[in-house]
Amino acid sequence: MSEKLRVLTVFGTRPEAVKMAPVVKVLNDEEKIEHRVCVTAQHRDMLDQVLKIFDIEPDYDLDIFEHGQSLSQITERAMKGIENVIKEFKPDVLLVQGDTTTVFAGALAGFYNGVKVGHVEAGLRSGNIYSPYPEEANRKMTGVVTEYHFAPTETSRNNLLKEDYPEDKIFITGNTVIDALLQVVDDEYIFEDDLLNEIDYENKKVVLLTSHRRENLGQPMRNIFTAVKRVVEENDDVEVIYPVHLNPKVREIAKEVFGDNEKVHLIEPVDYLPFANLIGKCHIVVTDSGGIQEEAPSLGKPVLVVRRETERPEGIEAGTAKLAGVEEETVYEMLTDLVRNEESYKKMANAVNPYGDGKSAQRIRDILLK
């Protein structure tokens, strides 16, 4: 091993970049560590937005993105590119984050080349290998070749122990998404989109909706949107902001259900910085996203999770989130309760966030140095 610990951080999508940004900063600032960043650019534009926000200059950019690429193609291109970087930089540790195809490819490339793998946000499990797809499988397969499991919560740690991973290789760090979020949310933030500035967040109960998961495409998504539309139509003080995913199937269903409803604002996807501040200004979050289940509670926002299962049960157990499923009537009833019942709302808004205190990246650095 070289005099300095050589660490290679690998990521490829916007969510990974957000969650790795605090880690990149503390590793770059540590004189005992020689650190390099490799991006696969599994996503291109959305990744570049986050790199700019957090002022990250990748040392290696594999630029693998192609329209219509399959999971197999992403895996192949990412593995080959990362392997070349490993041979050039010769890291002692390779860090990956979360559950994307880049994560699995990076971990496997590290394993094949004799490099110890550190998995940030290890141990999340939904219990269904096809949901979320392919993320649940990516996490589990990455775990097999991981040396350092950086689990965000006690629940994640227990999941890994149940799968017989060594206790001394599992470290509870909190989730780095909280580190990132606390750096960018500003009460005085001004949006570039005038519409978002004009909405009356003080007097309206603004619902932030996000929905894009593969497993929700079709009737489940139609159920979710219809439930939200009913709540909007029945409550004068409710408005919805929905940054619509670029997937044409998602856009088709959104247009079909919400049509020209003036209280449902269908907007283009927004960058991480305005989106984080949008969470801070809204009243309630309805989402099938993973990361937002962690972010919103940090800002005191109740979350309805519109999925059949979640790999983030800590929020459910803590009371910051509720699993609403994908059936229209259930989503409608739960959202109606949060909109009309102040006691239900306060109970969720004031629940303690189980995902961290903003110091996760520092803990990861300290563990690596030890």
Image (cartoon, rainbow, N blue to C red):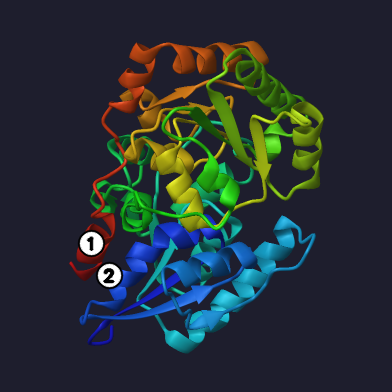
Q: Nearer the viewer, residue 7 or 285?
A: 285
Q: Is residue 335 above or below residue 50?
A: above
* Residue at numbered disc 1: 362
Q: Position of residue 231 (x, y in %)?
A: 60, 17
Estimate how packed mark 2 is, as few (under 14), some (14 to 19) or many (20 or more) residues with alpha carbons within 10 Å: some
* Residue that appears at 24% across and 47% down: 357
* Residue that appears at 53% across and 21% down: 237
Q: Nearer the viewer, residue 109 or 172?
A: 172
Disc 2 to disc 1: CB gap under 8 Å: yes
Q: Position of residue 255 (x, y in %)?
A: 79, 35
Regarding residue 317, the answer to whether it shows in the image is yes
Query: Circle 1 sits in a helix, a strand or a loop, which is it?
Result: helix
Label 2 to label 1: alpha-carbon separation? 7 Å
Q: Is residue 337 above or below residue 211?
A: above
Residue type at mark 2 is Val
Q: Position of residue 101 (x, y in %)?
A: 60, 57
* Residue at numbered disc 2: 26
Q: Nearer the viewer, residue 250 or 24?
A: 250
Lower position in the chain sequence, tag 2 or tag 1? 2
* Residue that appears at 63% across and 11% down: 329
Q: Is residue 239 above or below residue 42?
A: above
Quadrant for the C terminus, please. Answer: bottom left
Q: Nearer the viewer, residue 10 or 181?
A: 181
Looking at the rendered structure, the number of numbered marks drawn on it comes to 2
> Which image quadrant is residue 102 in?
bottom right
Left or right, residue 72 beside residue 104? right
Left or right, residue 56 beside residue 106? left
Residue type at mark 1 is Gln
Q: Position of residue 333 (x, y in %)?
A: 55, 11
Q: Is residue 191 above or below residue 162?
A: below
